[in-house]
Image (cartoon, rainbow, N blue to C red):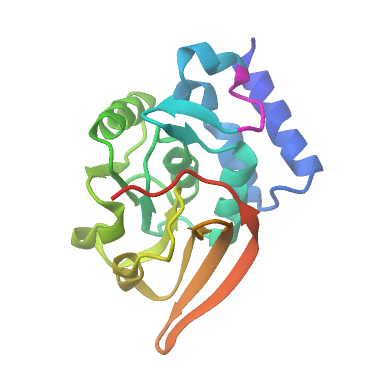
């Protein structure tokens, strides 16, 4: 399998189906080698638009969902971003292609996943800070952030994460217990404005 060719075809399919729109998102998905982030026995599926297991009961999100979330965050180069749920590191790597090195702060609950993601991202040349801890608490040491997103589903947007965002910034994530929706909140001086973008299915947030 020629991974580069397969990756180009994957992104072309996402464009044709209208899953992604922004030029920066398209470039980011073309740049990140997704096959490096999946288990060896799943590499032949790396450029299929589907989630895949990464161990510890967790998954790597489908490429269309990573791209959709990146579009919805409307990030710019230099934005500082909080990610809750490092997983294998793929989502962080795609986001880093937009905001640049040293601007992603990611929290992972499972120590084994955090360690593997840290090593993998360093090997691939990504400068992404990873902290092992409870994502419900965010990462206050580096706040405030220009955006935050969840790669796992929470019953409600974590208050600590919202408190760590700059005024006017976006929070994005799958929210709900029985039924999850992709929710975007705009943090303002008098509360938050809520938008929803349809049903989704993510693993549950731990912690």
Residue at 49% over, 75% down = 186
Residue at 33% over, 47% down = 206
Q: Nearer the viewer, residue 26 or 92?
A: 92
Which portion, as a residue range, is magenta?
45-50
> Magenta span has 88?
no
Q: Is residue 109 visible?
A: yes
Left or right position of 106 against 169:
left
Residue 150: x and y in percent read: 43, 53
Residue 99: x and y in percent read: 44, 51
Residue at 41% over, 47% down = 100
In the rendered image of this protein, does residue 172 appear above or below residue 128? Answer: below
In the rendered image of this protein, does residue 202 appear above or below residue 155? Answer: above
> Magenta span has 47?
yes
Q: Nearer the viewer, residue 134 or 66?
A: 134
Residue 82: x and y in percent read: 35, 56
Residue at 63% over, 25% down = 47
Q: Is residue 74 visible?
A: no
Residue 173: x and y in percent read: 49, 58
The image quadrant that residue 126 belongs to is top left
Q: Main secondary structure of the magenta part?
A: loop
Left or right position of 109 against 23:
left
């Amino acid at each position: 399998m020629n991974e580069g060719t397969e990756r180009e075809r994957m992104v072309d399919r996402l464009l044709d189906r209208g899953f992604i729109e922004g030029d920066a998102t398209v470039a980011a998905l073309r740049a990140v080698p997704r096959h490096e982030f999946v288990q060896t026995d799943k590499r032949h599926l790396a450029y299929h638009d589907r989630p895949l297991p990464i161990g510890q009961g967790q998954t790597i999100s489908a490429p269309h969902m990573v791209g959709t979330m990146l579009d919805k965050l409307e990030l710019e180069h230099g934005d500082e971003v909080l990610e809750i749920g490092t997983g294998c590191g793929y989502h962080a790597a795609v986001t880093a292609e937009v905001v640049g090195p040293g601007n992603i702060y990611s929290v992972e609950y499972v120590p084994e996943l955090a360690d593997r993601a840290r090593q993998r991202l360093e090997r691939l040349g990504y400068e992404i800070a990873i902290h092992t801890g409870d994502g419900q608490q965010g990462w206050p040491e580096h706040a405030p952030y220009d955006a935050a997103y969840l790669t796992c589903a929470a019953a409600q947007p974590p208050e600590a994460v919202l408190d760590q965002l700059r005024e006017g910034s976006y929070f994005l994530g799958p929210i709900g217990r029985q039924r999850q929706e992709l929710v975007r909140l705009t943090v303002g001086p008098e509360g938050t404005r809520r938008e929803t973008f349809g049903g989704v299915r993510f693993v549950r947030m731990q912690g």
